[in-house]
Image (cartoon, grey):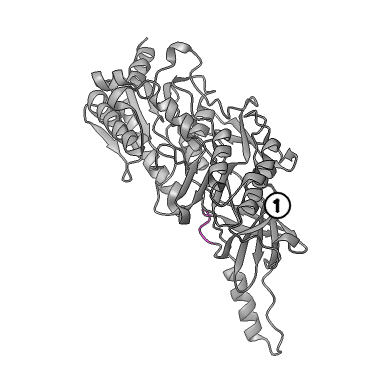
Amino acid sequence: MRNSYINIKTEIIKHFKKYFLILILLIFTACQSDDDTPPAADPINGFWSIADKGWIFEFTDDKDVFYNVNAAGCSIQNDDFVLQDFFGFNFDVIGENELIASSELSDSEIKFVRLPDQNPNCLPDQISATEDPKVNFDHFWNIFNDYYAFFETRNINWSQYENLRDQVTTDNLYDIIEELAYLLDDGHVSISDEENGIEIESGDPTLLEKLNANLSGDLIIENVDDYFDLVDQKATTIVTEYLGGDFEIDERENIIWGLINDDIGYILIATMEGYGTNFSDELSTLNAVLNRMMNDLSVSGISKLIIDIRFNDGGYDTVALNMVSRFMNQERVSYFKKARLGDGFTENTSFSVAPAGDFQFTEDIILLTSPYTVSAAELFTLCMKDLPYVTIVGENTNGAFSTILTHILPNGAEVGLSNEIYSDAQGVVYEVVGIGPENQENRVPFLSSLDFQVEKDSGIERALELLNN
């Protein structure tokens, strides 16, 4: 959440290792010993790799270093980072050569494999740390060439752009990179160089075009303020015209729920993150909110429900899955995921969602979606769409599902890209196209001049038509 309409959050990479107890025991044992045997080395020390992400970690007693590698060389993402608060990850040592990181905020474990030696390109005298525009272009092109998952899906021949390095200068580096980023047209591709005031979001032009498709005159969106002005107007219409000003909202104002009438409830989910004060209490706080919300729905006795995720720009996958679990009638395989690895992919792993909580709503549901529905909000849609009692109304979602992989260029700029492929339970991939209504009559614009003129919401109006038939 809560960024510009096209600013899909780049995941900031930090990590968490919990070996203090081991170290304390080692120190205590050493202190009790009668000889001068030095304390044993921390078993985590050494070099570790996550191949499908192009990440290498060097753990030492003094400090830890986080490297990014690609075919052009090696850069340092963080030369003095502390392995803490990386989305609540805990690390378990599996034998001598494997670390497993797991977190309740991640739908899958991350495996670290020990390297016998440091990657030659990551040795101190080989690190790429330079402003040289051609070197930075080489890294940019190779990061995508090595790890991007959707060249074929987006019908792009990436190899034909490698020779652009011959044209690159200090003055035009970001102009050329921007052109390539926009070519990808991916809501999860970004380049950020804070020092030089560079913020490039690959999905900007297409998303802006979709949001403006049914707007005219003074309502045309030209910047982020314009977008949020319209969102404020739309939210006001929803809570006044449809909820009658009577609604519940969580403390962080992420979820609104109430009754449209005695038989139809309404839930607006604005984000898939930011429910807790930190990683450790994110899901516990979320589930307390969900418990309260679902209890209200149960007590109300409604038999029909509208879930609105048109304003939702994503967050944590497991937040989305916890929400999905409150609308499941039985456990079922909901999606598959794999990551780009060399010329192929990692194992395609299935993920199931089961009912959770004291009460699950499993009667008629209308799910409202829009082009602004992205990332974890799309995963919510992916899991909900196959439920027999769910109908989608609105517009196709953004079409950017992957968790964002981050790499650092030699000049310090951060690059975000899509590295993972999500598919539904039948193996269908919705990257690029997004997920939307099956029937044309259920296709209703998220933002339209007519809605603002008459102070109505066409998506909710269509949902009510379907639920009342």
Q: How many marks?
A: 1
Relative to 134, does residue 48 appear above or below in the rendering?
below
Residue closest to the eye, 379 or 179: 179
Q: Quadrant of residue 5?
A: top left
Q: Quadrant of residue 39?
A: bottom right
Residue closest to the eye, 99 or 138: 138
Identify which amino acid the numbered label 1 is placed on.
Answer: Ala
Task: Write the residue at 47% across / 12% down.
Answer: 440
Q: Quadrant of residue 361?
A: top left
Residue 433 % position (x, y): 55, 25
Q: Is residue 302 left or right of residue 386?
A: left
Q: Please state the extent of the stretch shown in magenta in the rendering.
A: 84-88
Task: Look at the image and tell me in which quarter the N terminus lies.
Answer: top left
Return the residue at label 1.
Answer: 72
Residue 296 % position (x, y): 32, 33
Q: Is residue 356 left or right of residue 153?
A: left
Residue closest to the eye, 82 or 288: 82
Q: Is residue 85 magenta?
A: yes
Task: Write the residue at 29% across / 28% down.
Answer: 234
Whether residue 154 is visible here, answered yes or no, is: yes
Relative to 340, does residue 407 appear above or below in the rendering?
below
Task: Write the residue at 43% across / 44% down.
Answer: 273
Task: Look at the image and tell me in which quarter the C terminus lies.
Answer: top left
Is the stretch drawn in magenta largely helix, strand or loop?
Answer: loop
Q: Residue furthest right?
A: 116
Q: Is residue 461 left or right of residue 27?
A: left
Relative to 78, does residue 152 appear above or below in the rendering?
above
Q: Is residue 211 left or right of residue 84?
A: left
Residue 151 % position (x, y): 65, 33
Residue 205 % position (x, y): 47, 32
